[in-house]
Image (tube, rainbow, N blue to C red):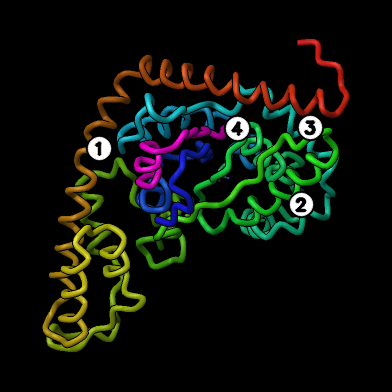
């Protein structure tokens, strides 16, 4: 993990609640958050408003997944006493800052954002892009700056968001009598993108190649057994290729004994180590990792009242911070503030 400075920083991360989280989220961000909460002031935003930007006609999907995502957080070890978990739609300062920032960002600048461009193509929006979707990078800049986050742990697909946020920070600070907004840095995890179990470059629920944190033992075993290995490794005695071999990509991401994995790789390359054996090692590792998460998650989902109380308390705490930034910005712009 490339933590640039040891001193305590304010961190913001977030997820759109559009489905339960999966192994890709786990290696890309969740396990990093569990570590970061020990040294830093960490906020996690359940980004339901952002979830609605491409689910405008399906609000139920977003609403239903808020507690699912929260249960995922708590079950992997994110501790609500150490990390403030909050709900975007109950933080009105975020929407207000978005309105203010929209005036200093051009439409063409947003359209040039590579992440937005990709998503527009992927989702087949063509010329019917929801206005809210087009401005979501601006809303994300509002999220990051409202918390005055200096560090934003994200996947590499989110780097253009950080760049755009910093442009807004500099532009807005230039309009204010004193710099108020804080520039941010991305914090990339070691494994920033886990391929799907089908070998597709990205694990994603919508691509149907994800293993959910709540996956049953059978579902895990099935995913591992269907994994793409080296197609020319026909007999156990044949030398095998490790590069691009899904089983080894996953072993690198999940196995905690790097030496052991290195040894497996050597034996696989030499010939004499079968796919089945490697898959057994991976399956054991994933079963051990996910069993306690699945159990805790199931318990948490039995107590929605508790989950709601965690989210409410975190949101109230976050409201103070975000409201304060909004008032500073408004005052700096010379606007009277009547609250
Ligand atoms: N864009 C992020 C995602 O799709 C979610 C998100 C919303 C976020 N606001 C954020 C991430 C602020 C980091 C910081 O997963």
User: Would you name the residue on which mark 1 appears?
Assistant: 294
For disc 2, the marked residue is 110
Kindly identify the residue that appears in the image at 29 percent across and 32 percent down.
Answer: 297
Q: Earlier in the sequence, mark 2 or mark 4?
A: 2
Q: Disc 4 vs disc 1: Cβ atoms closer than 8 Å? A: no
Does 35 appear in magenta?
yes
Give 120 or 306, whichever is nearer the viewer.
306
Q: Is residue 149 visible to the viewer in this orientation of the structure?
A: yes
Label 1, label 2: how far apart the Cα atoms are: 39 Å
User: What residue lies at 72% left-to-right and 34% top-to-bottom?
Assistant: 180
Which of label 3 and label 4 is nearer to you? 4
**Label located before the other in sequence (3 or 4):** 3
What's the magenta region? 30-49
Q: Quadrant of the C terminus?
A: top right
- Residue 4 position in % (x across, y down): 48, 53
- For mark 3, what is the residue? 99
Rendered image quadrant of residue 73: top left
Pointer 1 or 2: first along the chain: 2
105, 10: nearer the viewer: 10
Q: Is residue 268 above or below residue 49?
A: below
Residue 297 relative to residue 48: left or right: left
């Amino acid at each position: 993990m490339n933590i640039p400075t040891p001193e305590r920083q304010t961190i913001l991360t977030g997820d759109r609640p559009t489905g339960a989280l999966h192994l890709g989220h786990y290696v890309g961000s969740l396990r990093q958050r569990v570590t970061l909460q020990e040294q830093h002031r960490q906020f996690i935003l359940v980004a339901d408003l952002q979830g609605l930007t491409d689910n405008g006609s399906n609000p139920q999907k977003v609403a239903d997944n808020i507690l699912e995502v929260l249960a995922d957080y708590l079950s992997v070890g994110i501790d609500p006493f150490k990390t403030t978990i909050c709900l975007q739609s109950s933080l009105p300062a975020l929407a207000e800052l978005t309105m203010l920032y929209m005036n200093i960002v051009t439409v063409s600048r947003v359209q040039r954002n590579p992440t937005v461009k990709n998503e527009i193509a992927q989702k087949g929006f063509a010329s019917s892009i929801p206005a809210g979707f087009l401005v979501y990078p601006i809303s994300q800049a509002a999220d990051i700056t409202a918390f005055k986050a200096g560090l934003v742990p994200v996947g590499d697909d989110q780097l253009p968001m950080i760049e755009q946020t910093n442009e807004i920070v500099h532009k807005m600070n230039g309009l204010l009598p004193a710099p108020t907004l804080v520039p941010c840095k991305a914090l990339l995890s070691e494994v920033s993108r886990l391929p799907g179990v089908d070998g597709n470059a990205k694990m994603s629920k919508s691509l149907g190649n994800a293993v959910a944190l709540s996956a049953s033992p059978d579902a895990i075993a099935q995913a591992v057994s269907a994994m793409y290995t080296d197609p020319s490794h026909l007999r156990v005695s044949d030398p095998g290729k490790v590069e691009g071999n899904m089983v080894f990509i996953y072993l690198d991401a999940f196995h905690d004994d790097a030496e052991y994995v290195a040894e497996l790789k050597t034996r696989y390359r030499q010939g004499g180590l079968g796919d089945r054996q490697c898959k057994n090692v991976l399956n054991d590792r994933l079963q051990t990792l996910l069993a306690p998460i699945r159990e805790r998650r199931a318990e948490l989902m039995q107590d929605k009242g508790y989950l709601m109380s965690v989210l409410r308390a975190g949101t109230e705490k976050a409201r103070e911070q975000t409201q304060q930034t909004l008032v500073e910005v408004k005052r700096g712009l010379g606007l009277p503030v009547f609250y």
